[in-house]
Image: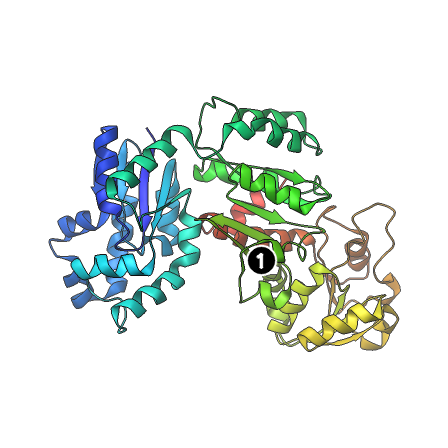
Amino acid sequence: MKRIVFCGFRGTGKTDIGRRVAEQTGLTFIDTDERIEEETGRSIPDIFHEDGEERFRAVEREVIADLPAADVVISTGGGVVTDPVNMEHLRRNSTVFVLHADIDTIEKRLQRKPRPPLTGLPLREEIAQMLERRRLHYQAAADFCIDTSGTTPQAAAAQALTILQHGTFDRNLREPCLAFFRSGRLPPQCMQRLDEILAMRPADPLTRLVGVAGYPCAHSKGPKLFNALFERYGLDYHYTWFEDPELDEILRVARQVDAKGLSVTIPFKKDIIPLIDEVDEHAAQAIGAVNTVIFSCGTARGYNTDWIGVRKPLVDKKGARAVLLGAGGAAAGAAYALVDLDMDVTILNRTEKKAREMAERFGCSWGTPDEFAKIRPDVVVNSTPLGMKPDDRMPVSSDLLEPEMTVFDLVYTPPVTPLIEAARKKGCTTITGTEMFIGQAKEQFYLFFGIDVPEATIRERIP
């Protein structure tokens, strides 16, 4: 039987609930904190006090890596989810439950079972701060969530066992959900896989969906890449296309099938913001576009990873003079990345009003494509969709390109666009849209599952 893992903040009931699930299933129960104390011969408070948290985390990492691969129920420490190496080990061929509770409940429980403080703050403030700090990690770790605030360990264990037996998809919704997917442009073999996952009596009721949401989105490389990564890391997920002209319909079906998350693409990156519960304040709010939505523990939270895919290939160009072509959804993420690299950015767009509005948001200069020649940038970033179709015109004339320029085309299908081809002929340094795709996909996978995939692993699996 696959491993069953319980994660969550201290005081959410991991040990009590884990023991009860182990008793009901006849599996061995392991508490990682207890195993750390057994192997070191010291209490966890002593390790924290004498050696510090860093040493404790190192020992914890060793214990996690050495856990049995199957037929066991595991309860982990509250901070285990913050380490991607731990998540890679714990998630492999396992079902991970994240237990959560409100602050009042956690505070009352911890007052009865004191543990070493993690900060110098009063208990309630510490709980609030640590929950916020680990929130991203808990939502990434969760295959399934259970709220233990107002329930007993027996009831929470029973809920976990029900999920293990039946999953969380309401089979009464099978036909309307399948009808939605049939209305898209899914290949027959992909439709067959969805039919198996959403079957009335599936072989594995715990398989969950993730997908790309857009219209159109059949060109996306996401399904092949993510499904290959699921196999690589032993994750019980399937990535598919949520293609529909109506975003409301996509979100309705995503919630009905209890999808773990969505990669959001054209034309919904802005439109999705008012339709989800929260937006990450660090990038997505500033950019005004969301390309990643995580459904976890009853909340839909949006992020933007596009800017990371733009920033990383250009790190060595920090402080350069840059031209950004376009002022749409993709341009916002690119502008955020270029400004973050302290570049002198000019946004050029055929519609002056859009260029001006975006430039004002990010503190950039602006103009029309006619002004490209007088700027003579060091870096050129194309954020328009020009280049996706064979008969598309160039976003900038090849006559304006110079050998000293670095040309980055965010279009990744086809991998070599007319702009990239022209720039290579002129002797420019070129960066294809594949590099952006790799960077944003790496970050997106981390948000979805808490695993830090090496770039080389992604590159090997790009179709």
Quarter of the image with the C terminus in it? top right
User: Picture coordinates of residue 410 (x, y %)?
Assistant: 70, 56
Nearer to the camera, 429 or 25: 25
User: Picture coordinates of residue 377 (x, y %)?
Assistant: 76, 73
Whether residue 156 is situated above or below residue 125 in the rendered picture: above
Q: How many marks?
A: 1
Which image quadrant is residue 113 in? bottom left
In the rendered image, which residue does mark 1 sit on?
A: 305
Asked if residue 290 can be seen in this view, the reply is: no
Crowding near pointer 1: few (<14 within 10 Å), some, many (20+)? Answer: many
Q: How is the image coloured?
A: rainbow
Whether residue 336 is situated above or below residue 259 in the rendered picture: below
Q: Is residue 17 left or right of residue 212?
A: left
Q: Is residue 351 left or right of residue 463?
A: right
Q: Is residue 321 left or right of residue 459?
A: right
Nearer to the camera, 170 or 4: 170
Quarter of the image with the N terminus in it? top left
Question: Residue placed at 28% from the left, 46% from the top?
Answer: 64
Give the farthest residue toward the left. 41
Question: Residue placed at 79% from the left, 53% from the top?
Answer: 421
Check disc 1 and give the amino acid type: Thr
Whether residue 44 is situated above or below residue 242 in the rendered picture: below
Which image quadrant is residue 311 in? bottom right
Asked if residue 164 can be seen in this view, the reply is: yes
Question: Residue placed at 77% from the left, 58% from the top?
Answer: 384
User: Picture coordinates of residue 184 (x, y %)?
Assistant: 70, 34
Secondary structure of residue under mark 1? loop
Which image quadrant is residue 189 in? top right
User: Picture coordinates of residue 204 (x, y %)?
Assistant: 44, 27
